[in-house]
């Protein structure tokens, strides 16, 4: 028997490239891989979009905060809001300022005192909290997809793995042989499904944790700004009782 020829024949049978393994995989495994690839592409798209969004908001908030502490009056800040359309702080300020104006209009205080004495600071607190929650909700949008990809990606890949191994055992049962040439294609597609599941899940989990951390920082900054605005309003526009 020509062992060299047999060895070369066996090598040609089991030397399966990644693309060959995918193209010859069962429809279920191919569908699993397609789902994982789509989830990975969408996750990267969300991550890139969020990176741009956070950079724009951080820069705009820094500029608005600089204006806020150097302006002579709240009216001057409100007049300049068109320059800070991307700033979360500016949007919180706008809603709080409008609520403050509403309280002033409803107070019926027509005195010519330099400092008005308004009531209803609870309304202003609610307006600040509502505005901050709205901005945080916008930042959290689509992050749930990253969390879903990170948590389910490995299990979806594991499903493809199990299905590929089942296919390998079915070939063993059909041929009555347990040689590498028989089981290699099924094992190969199974391992590829596992790898693609991890490739989709690991970056999504990293991105999710990264942006959750950034959201916490923005939330803290908005809470601090709301507290500062409330203190300024208390000192200058509200009376006790």
Image: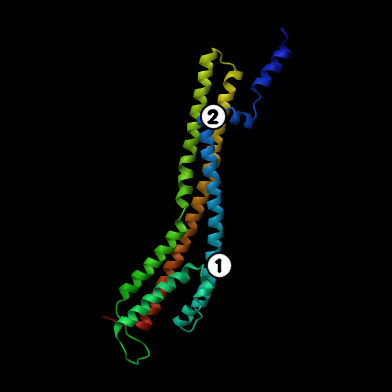
User: What x and y, as percent, mark residue 56?
Assistant: 55, 64
Q: Relative to the observer, which residue lies in front, 30 or 96?
A: 30
Q: Which residue is situated farthest in the bottom direction here?
A: 112
User: What x and y, as percent, mark residue 168?
Assistant: 53, 22
What residue appears at the point 51 percent right and 78 percent down from the top-left corner?
A: 80
Residue ID for mark 1:
59
* Secondary structure type for disc 2: helix
The C terminus: image quadrant: bottom left
User: What x and y, as percent, mark residue 138?
Assistant: 45, 60
Q: Which mark is residue 190?
A: 2
Q: Which residue is situated farthest in the left direction here?
A: 241
Q: Residues within 10 Å of mark 2 (few under 14, many from 20)?
A: many
Q: Relative to the observer, which residue lies in front, 53 or 207?
A: 53
User: What x and y, as percent, mark residue 109?
Assistant: 30, 87
Q: Relative to the observer, which residue lies in front, 231 or 96?
A: 96
What residue appears at the point 49 percent right and 51 percent down from the top-left corner?
A: 209
Say which label, 1 or 2, has the lower sequence index: 1
């Amino acid at each position: 028997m020509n062992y060299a020829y047999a060895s070369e024949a066996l090598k040609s049978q089991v030397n399966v490239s990644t693309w060959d393994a995918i193209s010859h995989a069962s429809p279920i495994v191919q569908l699993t891989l397609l789902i994982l690839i789509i989830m990975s592409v969408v996750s990267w798209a969300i991550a890139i979009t969020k990176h741009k969004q956070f950079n724009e908001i951080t820069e705009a908030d820094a500029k608005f905060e600089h204006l806020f502490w150097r302006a002579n009056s709240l009216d001057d800040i409100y007049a300049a809001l068109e320059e800070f359309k991307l700033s979360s702080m500016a949007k919180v300020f706008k809603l709080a300022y409008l609520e403050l104006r509403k309280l002033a209009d409803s107070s019926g205080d027509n005195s010519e005192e330099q400092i008005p004495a308004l009531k209803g600071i609870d309304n202003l607190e609610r307006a600040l909290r509502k505005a901050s929650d709205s901005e945080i909700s916008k930042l959290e949008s689509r992050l749930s997809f990253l969390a879903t990809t990170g948590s389910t990606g490995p299990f979806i890949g594991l499903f493809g793995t199990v299905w590929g191994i089942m296919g390998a055992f079915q070939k063993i049962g059909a041929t009555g042989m347990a040689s590498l040439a028989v089981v290699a294609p099924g094992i190969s597609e199974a391992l590829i499904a596992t790898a693609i599941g991890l490739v989709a899940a690991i970056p999504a989990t990293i991105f999710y944790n990264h942006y959750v951390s950034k959201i916490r920082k923005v939330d803290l900054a908005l809470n601090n700004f709301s507290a500062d605005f409330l203190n300024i309003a208390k000192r200058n526009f509200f009376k006790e009782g």
